Structures are given as structure tokens and as C-alpha cells.
Image (cartoon, grey):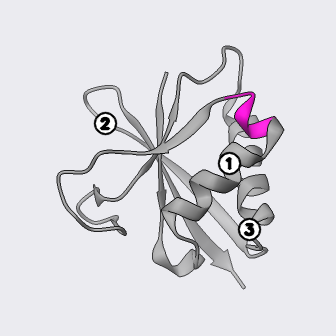
Amino acid sequence: MNYKIALLPELGISLDDFVAAWNETPECRDVAIARIAESRTKTRSFDPTLLTGALAVLGSLAAGVGTNALYDLIKKALTRKGIKKQIEITQIDQPDGTRILIVKITAE
């Protein structure tokens, strides 16, 4: 199963930096390889109102990885790049079966 990750601009991290942090972290890389999704738009940020824009994809997620473990790994990758803010991750299930995880700040 593939998950798409949407990082809201308020996080202060680019998609490129998140993908690099994920793939450089052994615990994360053992679960899935991250890449930037091909987008129909040329934007490098995500618009949560339209569910469009730049997304990272965690491809071929390892079997048996639970949602909470995945969320913890996302937090670990963000921490690796210096993001120490309180975050919230919301899952949106699309009609085609795609799962988008929206990552945003909840508190400073």
C-alpha cells in the first residue's frame, strides 16, 4: 500500500528535505522508500482545501506497519531535519483507495 504525505507550508520543511530525511533514517527506510509524487500541477506546496499540490509518496509500505508506527516514523524524519514543533497527522481516504496523510502544526 502507498501513502501520500502532504506537508503544510507552516512546517517550514520542503518536500525534498522530508524525502531525504526519510530515506536517510534507517528505521524509516526499512518501512518504505520515500519519493516525490508526480503532480499535475507545478506547485511545491499542498493545498488542503483542494487536495492538490506537492506530495511525498511512501511506496510499498512494509507489511504489518500500523498507523501509529507510521506516524511516529514521520515525526522522526521531521525531527531529523530540525522540526521540533507539535504536529498533527490527519488521514484522508480517497474514493480510489489512496490515503493522504496531512501533516500540520498543532502548537508551537
Q: Is residue 40 left or right of residue 51?
A: left
Magenta segment range?
A: 27-31
Pointer 2 residue:
94
Q: Secondary structure at mark 1?
A: helix
Given the current orientation, which residue lies at the most extreme bottom position?
108
Point out the tag, 1 or 3, that comes first from the N-terminus.
Answer: 1
Q: Secondary structure at mark 3?
A: loop
Task: Tell me the chief SS of the magenta region.
Answer: helix
Percent x, y of residue 73: 75, 45
* Amino acid type of the residue that numbered disc 3 sits on in the rendered structure: Lys
* Amino acid type of the residue that numbered disc 2 sits on in the rendered structure: Gln
Give the spatial CA distance, label 2 vs label 1: 24 Å
| Residue 71 seen by the camera | no
Point out the tag, 2 or 1, that comes first from the N-terminus.
Answer: 1
Mark 2 neighbour class, 10 Å CA radius: few under 14, some 14 to 19, many 20 or more: few
Mark 1 neighbour class, 10 Å CA radius: few under 14, some 14 to 19, many 20 or more: many
Quarter occupied by the C terminus: bottom right
| Residue 11 seen by the camera | yes
